[in-house]
């Protein structure tokens, strides 16, 4: 049965307090992300600016508690073992039916918003060293994603190569580059080419916009809550993928794979239809790229893009529009909104009306193929 062995395309670790202070040297050592213990919890500070507290302390609590009981402040010692120890990570996830995981960061997601590009890159390099060591516990089950700062494309390619040499399976770039450096620009051609040459799929995870410096824990206004729930969820990924598609990136790099992580999927049908409508029905601007006759923008999404979802039952019902081969499930372990420890149950309900062969693709085979997991060996 497909749900007996799950592969999570989006799981996380929780970074230890000394990750950056113990690894970053030279000019950036004094500005390395660090933890400050405050009255109600431990908080990360990035270049002197308050970021967020520790995650991984209430995994599964949402199933047992009212939302008003969930916390946003915690101590490092309260972080569950599986979020910080690779062997415990593997054992806990196996208990949830997850035999292999693609691993993203927690605090380091916000490294993309560090304004100083040198500090941004140094922070990411230190994390990449850490996650490579973490995943070396069992490379067959744990595949880490390298964080890459594309402000300098040549340096980004070097970091991708370094990550691949260390055993990392993919590269993550900002979901929202600066407006003047959008992904339709030729400057990124070396990054796209390196992704193909190194066999490192590129992903764009929620909360990695280059222009946001921190999380505002207080969220004093309804507008900010609304943005967190809707605007930030899929707006930026649509913008970035659209820029890549319309500028012919996938036409020039037909083997390039680029994906959306933790933005869910129900936005896809409208996104694809509007791209095609714009391309075919609106007046042509002089600088618009044109594809080969009969080729539509949506075709490049289906051939080159992938999407990782968590609990989007509505989006799953529209999978025929964007292709079941693009879909990958992720548990988001060990974050508060994770499906752990009820992943089998939740995925089972979401995919109840989906044929078993498609279920297998969504919860296991698509991610296994993209990132090189040998599921047969893991489940033998």
Image (tube, helix red, strand yellow):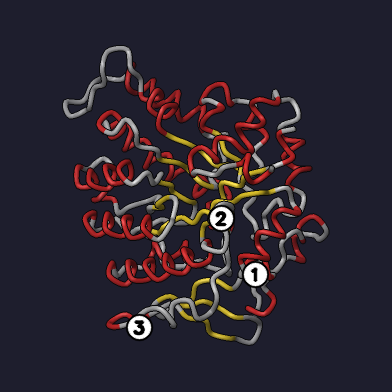
Q: Nearer the viewer, residue 66 or 118?
A: 118
Q: Which of 73 and 147 is in front in this view?
A: 147
Tag on residue 72? 1
User: CB under 8 Å between callouts 2 and 3?
Assistant: no
Tag on residue 142? 2
Q: In which quarter of the image is the C terminus?
A: top right
Q: Mark 3 points at which residue?
A: 29
In-image side of 366 versus 170 (left or right): right
Looking at the picture, how far across and down is residue 375, in whole percent? 61, 41
Residue plotted at (37% across, 42% down):
240
Tag on residue 379? none
Q: In terms of sequence position, does the residue under pointer 2 or pointer 3 come before the other?
A: 3
Residue plotted at (65% across, 62% down):
89
Q: Nearer the viewer, residue 32 or 158?
A: 158
What secondary structure is marked by label 1? loop
Q: In terms of sequence position, does the residue under pointer 1 or pointer 3 come before the other?
A: 3
Q: How far apart are marks 2 and 3 (CA)?
A: 29 Å
User: CB under 8 Å between callouts 1 and 3?
Assistant: no
Q: In terms of sequence position, does the residue under pointer 1 or pointer 2 come before the other?
A: 1
Looking at the picture, how far across and down is residue 154, in whole percent? 21, 56
Q: Distance between the residues labelled 1 and 3?
A: 28 Å
Looking at the picture, how far across and down is residue 19, in whole percent? 48, 76
Q: Quadrant of the N terminus?
A: top right
């Amino acid at each position: 049965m497909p749900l007996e062995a799950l592969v999570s395309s989006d799981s996380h670790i929780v970074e230890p307090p000394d990750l950056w202070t113990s690894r970053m040297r030279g000019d950036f050592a004094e500005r390395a992300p660090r933890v400050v213990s405050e009255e109600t919890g431990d908080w990360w500070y990035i270049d002197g600016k308050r970021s967020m507290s520790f995650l991984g302390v209430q995994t599964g609590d949402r199933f047992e508690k009212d939302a008003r009981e969930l916390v946003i402040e915690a101590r490092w010692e309260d972080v569950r073992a599986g979020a910080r120890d690779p062997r415990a990570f593997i054992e806990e996830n196996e208990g949830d039916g997850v035999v292999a995981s693609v691993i993203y960061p927690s605090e380091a997601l916000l490294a993309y918003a560090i304004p100083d590009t040198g500090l941004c890159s140094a922070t990411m390099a230190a994390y990449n060293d850490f996650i490579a060591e973490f995943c070396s516990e069992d490379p067959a089950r744990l595949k880490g994603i390298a964080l890459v700062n594309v402000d300098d494309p040549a340096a980004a390619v070097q970091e991708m190569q370094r990550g691949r040499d260390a055993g990392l399976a993919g590269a993550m770039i900002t979901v929202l580059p600066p407006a003047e450096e959008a992904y339709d620009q030729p400057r990124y051609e070396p990054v796209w080419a390196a992704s193909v040459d190194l066999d490192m799929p590129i992903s764009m995870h929620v909360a990695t916009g280059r222009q946001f410096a921190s999380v505002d824990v207080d969220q004093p206004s309804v507008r900010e809550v609304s943005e967190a729930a809707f605007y930030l969820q899929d707006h930026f990924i649509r913008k970035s993928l659209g820029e890549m598609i319309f500028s012919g990136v996938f036409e020039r790099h037909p083997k390039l794979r680029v994906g959306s992580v933790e933005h869910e999927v129900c936005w896809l049908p409208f996104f694809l239809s509007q791209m095609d409508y714009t391309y075919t029905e609106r007046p042509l601007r002089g600088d618009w790229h044109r594809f080969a006759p009969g080729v539509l923008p949506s075709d490049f999404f289906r051939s080159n893009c992938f999407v990782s979802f968590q609990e989007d039952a509505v989006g799953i019902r529209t999978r025929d529009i964007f292709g079941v081969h693009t879909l990958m499930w992720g548990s988001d372990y060990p974050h508060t909104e994770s499906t752990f420890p009820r992943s089998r149950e939740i995925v089972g309900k979401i995919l109840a009306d989906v044929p078993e062969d498609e279920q297998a693709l969504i919860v296991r085979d698509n991610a296994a193929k993209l990132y090189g997991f040998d599921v047969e060996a893991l489940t033998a």
